Image (cartoon, rainbow, N blue to C red):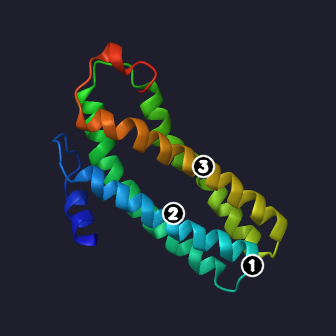
Amino acid sequence: MFNFIRKISRKKIDKHFNGRLISTLHKDHEALAKLFNLLEKAVKDSSNDTLKKLSDFLDELNLHLLLENSKLYTYLEFRYKYCDLKKLKKIKEEISKNLYLFDKLKTAIKENRHNEALLLIEKIKHFLLRRIQYEEEKLYDVYTNLYKCSQLRGIL
């Protein structure tokens, strides 16, 4: 995975279709879900390795976002550049707009504010699951099939 990421990071813009991308992103989502479940369990149990689990999750999330943004979103933005892409742009920016939640979670864990950490982990889980669901149910299909702009209303 890391070699694949390194290759991608050398290319700033990739406007080409990649037949393996969707399966790679889906596997990433599964790996992220496992890491998040470990993090969530650590938060609930007030485990000593909760910060390590948070760090592991964030490292994997950053790699995934690098791949996703440089391949999936760039391709969709290029392919459908004449369509209304407001929803696509909104979902693409959702994680960066919610990064403050991870910082708040880290602080809550460090300061042993268990109830706050539990609330934050639920809030993070909600927006991550919503994003993954949108990508897997809508964007992956739009990536692999050709649509007209009129067909994309409500999707992108």
Q: Secondary structure at mark 3?
A: loop
User: Looking at the image, do the residues carrying marks 1 and 3 touch, with CB atoms under 8 Å apart?
Assistant: no
Amino acid type, residue under disc 3 in the picture: Asn
Q: Quadrant of residue 67?
A: bottom left
Amino acid type, residue under disc 2 in the picture: Ala
In percent of the image, x 60 and y 49: which residue is there?
98
Q: Marks 1 and 3: which is nearer the front?
A: 1
Relative placement, left or right, of 48 versus 135 is: right
Work out whether 49 lies above or below 127. below
Q: Marks 2 and 3: which is nearer the front?
A: 2
Label at residue 98: 3
User: Looking at the image, do the residues carrying marks 2 and 3 touch, with CB atoms under 8 Å apart?
Assistant: no
Relative placement, left or right, of 62 versus 46 is: left
- Which residue is identified by label 1? 45
Q: Quadrant of the N terminus?
A: bottom left
Q: Secondary structure at mark 1?
A: helix
- Few, some or many residues within 10 Å of mark 3 (<14, 14–19, 20+): some
In percent of the image, x 47 and y 64: which residue is there?
32
- Toward the viewer: 62 or 22? 22
Q: Secondary structure at mark 2?
A: helix
Q: Position of residue 143 (x, y in %)?
A: 27, 37
- Which residue is identified by label 2? 33
Relative placement, left or right, of 92 versus 45 is: left
Disc 1 to disc 3, how far (Cα)?
A: 24 Å
